[in-house]
Amino acid sequence: MRYQNIEFEITNGIAVLTLNRPDKLNSFTQAMHLEVRHALALTATDPSARVLVLTGAGRGFCAGQDLGDRAVAPGEEGTRTDLGDSVEQYYAPLVLSLRALPLPVICAVNGVAAGAGANLALACDIVIAARSASFIESFCKLGLIPDTGGTYHLPRLIGMARATGLAMLGEKLGAEKAEQWGLIWKCVDDDQLMTEAMAMATHFSSAATKGLAFTKKAFQASYANTLPQQLKLEGEMMRELGFSHDYQEGVAAFTAKRAANFKGE
């Protein structure tokens, strides 16, 4: 598939997906959704992919939905756009695809992340942001709610009080404060953003990927499970991982005091 709205490649185990509509701050259209969906499917099915890095081209990460896209433009009275359809067909599958990827997902936020763009970042496993980056839950300015998983992830990451303030006021949250609040993993100098992100990706590209995928899955399950249910899940996962190549290799490497050669299996 030839992409018009994104850039995508897998090299040395590292998949890099770049939102590439810089003149529109990488805001989403239906066409870009379909291209991102295709790239995520390739990442999920390519056995060489061990980690995904998601970022944006130009001066912004993602400004959310392109309101100029005819698919979401308000219509005349009686023919108004069904935004629920947009969420169900595009944004919900996007978030679920990211969360279901059996590998770590790093988001490198290189500038403004607004609306769906902010919540797309928060759906990733680890978020690194440039110091000049910012997060804006801009939905309230349009009479909407924080979709793209915003109502799910925000309260869990920073608590109800801060989540409510961000959602109802639509104020800009700088990267440094986002780090202080625990919304993101790390804030770095602008010129170090991709260096940091790719260094982390390189680490994950040779890590015990299956164990990381199970960690991701277990954390997600913990939101709905009781403690006994979660302990049972941990036992099931540990049973399977105990028979994996990476566990055997990890123990052998530890005993021999050498670097482990993990295969993600």
Image: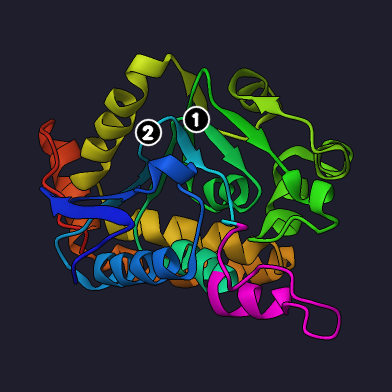
Residue located at (74% from left, 69% from top):
74
Q: Is residue 193 left or right of residue 138?
A: left
* Nearer the observer, 215 or 198: 198
Q: Where residue 168 sits: x, y (%)?
A: 88, 44
The residue positioned farthest toward the front in the image shown:
76
Three-letter amino acid code at disc 1? Gly
Q: Earlier in the sequence, mark 1 or mark 2?
A: 2
* Nearer the observer, 225 or 9: 9
Mark seen at residue 89: none
* Nearer the observer, 15 or 6: 6
Q: Which residue is mark 2?
A: 58
Vertical arrangement, residue 245 with respect to residue 249, above or below: below
The quadrant where residue 33 appears: bottom left
The answer to whether marks 1 and 2 mark residues whose Cβ atoms lie closer than 8 Å is yes
Three-letter amino acid code at disc 2? Gly
Q: Where residue 39 sits: x, y (%)?
A: 29, 65
Q: Is residue 202 left or right of residue 63?
A: left
In this view, the mark in front (1 or 2): 2
Residue located at (66% from left, 81% from top):
85
Vertical arrangement, residue 83 with respect to residue 59, above or below: below
The quadrant where residue 171 appears: top right
* Nearer the observer, 217 or 73: 73
Q: Where residue 234 sits: x, y (%)?
A: 52, 64
The question of residue 83 being in magenta is answered with yes
Quadrant holding the C terminus = bottom left
**Span colored in magenta:** 67-90
Q: Which residue is mark 1?
A: 111
Residue located at (51% from left, 51% from top):
27
